[in-house]
Amino acid sequence: MPELPEVETIVRDLRPRLRGEQVVHVRLGHPSLIRYPGPTAFADGLTGATTGGLRRRGKFILLELRGPRLVTGAVLVVHLGMSGSLCVVEAGVAERPHTHLALRLRGGGELRFVDPRRFGRLLLGAPDELVRLGRLPTLGPEPLGPGLPDAWWQAALRRSHRPVKALLLDQRVVAGCGNIYADEACFRAGIRPQRRADRCTRAEASALGRALEAVLWTAIANRGSSIASYRDGLGARGSAQRALAVYGRAGQPCSRCRAPLRGTVVAQRTTVYCRSCQR
DNA sequence: CACGACACCTGCCGGC
DNA sequence: TGCCGGCAGGTGTCGT
């Protein structure tokens, strides 16, 4: 559910509400979401900690923390999985089902992580240490910010025999792209998702990189997609689903050529593309 | 090593 | 109305 634009939206919304707060109480839900350390050390480390900056890395949310039981550089790491949401509410607000973490803050707010399917993850520690311990994956570069140069995309595609879409979904290649924006980027670049990466021209590789940047920036400007249960950091629905060109539109006319969009499966994921606009 | 298949969960939607 | 199958934005693990 949440890809880079959704996670970015949540981080932007929550950042001002989390800076310089103190955690006065911790409540955990299902323990299996706590991936590091164990639930007891996790709760103890958070209790009494002071919050700092909030940032995004790929689809991960990182909240900087300082506390008596925390190593320097410690962060609370949150991955939303397919169905997770993160928001700050007033402490008195009724708790939704599947709330797996509630941090009561001295200022009267409460940071809540809700995740019905429990595909999400929570970790506590210094990011480089968590990677070294094998608790966090090594991620590829961020596709936004300065953006990745054409030569980078050309090299990445040339190196792989996999379908272009499989590359876009691989977080070790580039961090943050998921199923929606992989399809959207392929459409915008005029490349079929199932096309073998190393059979793309250099111009197509460059176009793919620029297309991914464009669809991600557009989605961020729209505050993320709002398919199904997505909520941004304020608990409201996003609006980018109206802007999607292909995702969720199998059988509907292509916005560019009016031919019916084709639904299929690529890299084990539902995929939609236009047979005439994408080659 | 690189890749594909599958497992992990609950909720929701459409069809019968 | 109610039940059931199918499907969902992600990723870790296992086998080839």
Image (tube, coloured by chain):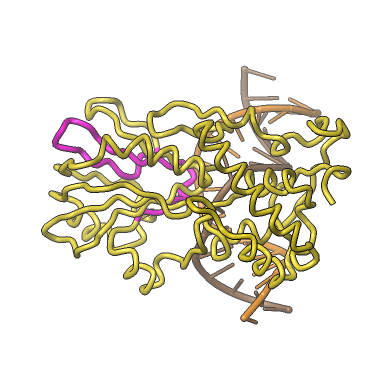
Chain colours: A yellow, B orange, C brown
Apparent side of residue A115 relative to residue C7 in the rendered image (left or right)? left
Apparent side of residue A189 relative to residue A50 in the rendered image (left or right)? right
Residue ID at (66%, 69%): A155
| Residue A94, position as x, y percentages in the image | 30, 26
The residue closer to the viewer here, A162 or C2, is: A162
The residue closer to the viewer here, A102 or A196, is: A196
Query: Most prominent secondary structure in the magenta stretch?
Result: strand
User: Which quarter of the rendering shows the N terminus of chain A?
Assistant: top right
Image quadrant assignment for residue A15: top left
Q: Is residue A109 magenta?
A: yes
| Residue C8, position as x, y percentages in the image | 63, 43
Residue ID at (28%, 64%): A126
Q: In this view, does A211 lie above or below A224?
A: below
Q: Does the magenta stretch include residue A276?
A: no
Residue ID at (66%, 34%): A244
Residue ID at (78%, 64%): A196
| Residue A266, position as x, y percentages in the image | 74, 55
Apparent side of residue B16 relative to residue A178 in the rendered image (left or right)? right
Span colored in magenta? A98-122
Image quadrant assignment for residue A240: top right
| Residue A44, position as x, y percentages in the image | 17, 55
Apparent side of residue A191 relative to residue A31 in the rendered image (left or right)? right
